[in-house]
Amino acid sequence: MSSTFAPFARPLYIMVKSVGSVCNLACDYCYYLEKSNLYKDTSNHILSDELLEKFIKEYIESQTMPEVLFTWHGGETLMRPLSFYQKAMELQKKYAGGRRIDNCIQTNGTLLNDAWCEFFKQNNWLVGISIDGPQEFHDEYRKNKQGLPSFVKVMRGINLLKKHGVEWNALAVVNDFNADYPLDFYNFFKEIGCKYIQFTPIVERILNHNDGRHLATVQANESAKLADFSVSPKQWGNFICTIFDEWIKEDVGSVFIQLFDATLANWIGEQPGVCTMAKTCGHAGVMEFNGDVYSCDHYVFPEYKLGNIHSKSLVEMMYSERQQKFGQDKFTKLPSQCKSCDYLFACNGECPKNRFARTKDGEPGLNYLCQGYYQFFDHVAPYMDFMKKELLNKRAPSNVMDAVRNGEISKF
Ligand code: SF4
Ligand code: SF4
C-alpha cells in the first residue's frame, strides 16, 4: 500500500472531553469540574455523534505520522455509554486510511465493569486510573458529591482490569496530605501490581468570586491564593527523592515512573515523554464537548481558546501563531534563575501553569516547585550520569542497581 503521509513530522495531539467536565465524583482538587461554568447556557455537555465523526476524520487526516493516538479524557469518561466508544472505534476504522490507531482513556475507575474491561482488552486500549495511593490517602480528597469515599470502588475497577488483562497505569496526585508518606505510597503501587506510575504534584491557585471559587490563570493573578491541598516545594522534593532511592535499588526496568524516565531522557538529550519536562510544549490541545479547542488541558480558560472545529481546522488552530507562541513561551519566558540553573536541561522550568513564584532576586515567573525540583535533580545526578554512560555504551541502564549495591556510585 502506498503511503500518502506528509514527508515531515508535525506532532498534533488533541485530548477529547467526551462528557465535558461532568463527573460522578467531586474530588476536592479536580481542576476540571469548574469548567462547566464556561458552558453555563448549555444543558447537555455531551459530545454528539456528528461532532465525533467530524473530529475523528479530521484528527486522523491531520496526522503526519503513521500512528495516531486518541486520548479520551473527562470529567469522567465512563459516563458515556460503551456504545459511544464502540462508535468511535468504527469511525476510526472507517477513516484510518492505513494508519495505526491507538487509544488511551483516563478514568476514575469507579464505573468499570466486565463489559468495559472486555472492550478495552479486545481493542488494546490503555486505561489510566486516577488513584492517590492507599485508602487513607486516596479517600482524603477523592470523594463523591455526597462526600462519600471512592477508594473501594476504584480498587474494584483495578481488579477487574487485572482480571481481564487490560493494560493500565496509575495517575497519582501528590498533595499536602500524602506527600509526607512516599514509601507507603510507592509500596502500595507495587503491591497492587502497578508498573507504570505518573506522580502529579498538585498545585492550584484559587480566586474567590461572587459566583464561587475559580482557578487562577497562570501568573496573571497575584491575588490568587494557593489552595490548601497543594503540595509544598519541600514536600515534593523529599517525596520524589525518597521514592527514587527505593526505585534505584531494585526497580529500574521493572517499575516505570514517568518523572524518572523523563529525567533520564533529558539527561541523554532525547525528547522526554511528558510535556512538563520538555523545552517547549503546545502540541497537545483539548477539545471540549461542543468542538471548542484550547491550548492545553490546564489552560481551558476563555483567553486560551483557539477556536471551534466547526469554523477552523485542527491544524489551523494547533499550528496557529498563537499556539506556537504558547509552546515557545515555555522556554522564552523563563526567569534568569532558570536560564543559569545547572539543571535547566532536565527541568526546563516545568509547567508554566506553576510559574507564579519569584526568584531570589524578586523576578516573577519562577516555578513554585523549583526548590523541590532542584533538590531532586541534584540528588539523582550521579545515578543519571551512570545510566547515561550505560546507554551510550549500549548497555542496560538497570545496571545502575548493581553499581548502587557495590557502592560504585559515591553519593549513595
Ligand atoms: S502548559 Fe504545562 S501541561 Fe500544558 S502543554 Fe505546557 S507544559 Fe504541558
Ligand atoms: S530547578 Fe528551579 S531554577 Fe532550575 S530550571 Fe527548574 S525551576 Fe528553574
Image (cartoon, helix red, strand yellow):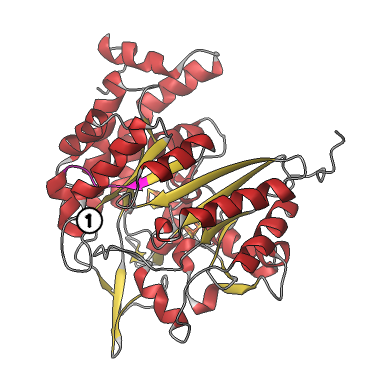
The overriding secondary structure of the stretch rendered in magenta is loop
Task: Examine the rendering and report whether any part of residue 410 can be seen.
Answer: no
- Residue 152 percent across, percent down from the top left: 19, 47
Q: Quadrant of the N terminus?
A: top right
Q: Position of residue 278 (x, y in %)?
A: 52, 47
**Above or below: residue 262 compared with residue 96:** above
Residue 201 at x, y percent in the picture: 31, 52
Query: What is the count of numbered marks?
Result: 1
The extreme bottom residue here reads 210
- Location of residue 368 (image quadrant): bottom left
State yes or no: Cβ of the residue under disc 1 lies below 8 Å from any atom of ligand 2: no
Q: Is residue 200 left or right of residue 278?
A: left
Q: Is residue 286 above or below residue 36?
A: above
Q: Which residues are magenta?
A: 129-134
At 30% from the left and 60% from the top, the residue drawn is: 203
- 132 drawn magenta: yes
Q: Nearer the viewer, residue 149 or 119?
A: 119
User: In the depicted view, which residue is nearer to us: 339 or 389?
Assistant: 389
Q: Amino acid at mark 1?
A: Ser
Q: Which residue is mark 1?
A: 232
Secondary structure under tag 1 reads loop
Most extreme residue toward the right is: 2
Q: Residue at x 52, y 55 (%)?
A: 83
Q: Residue at x 36, y 67 (%)?
A: 356
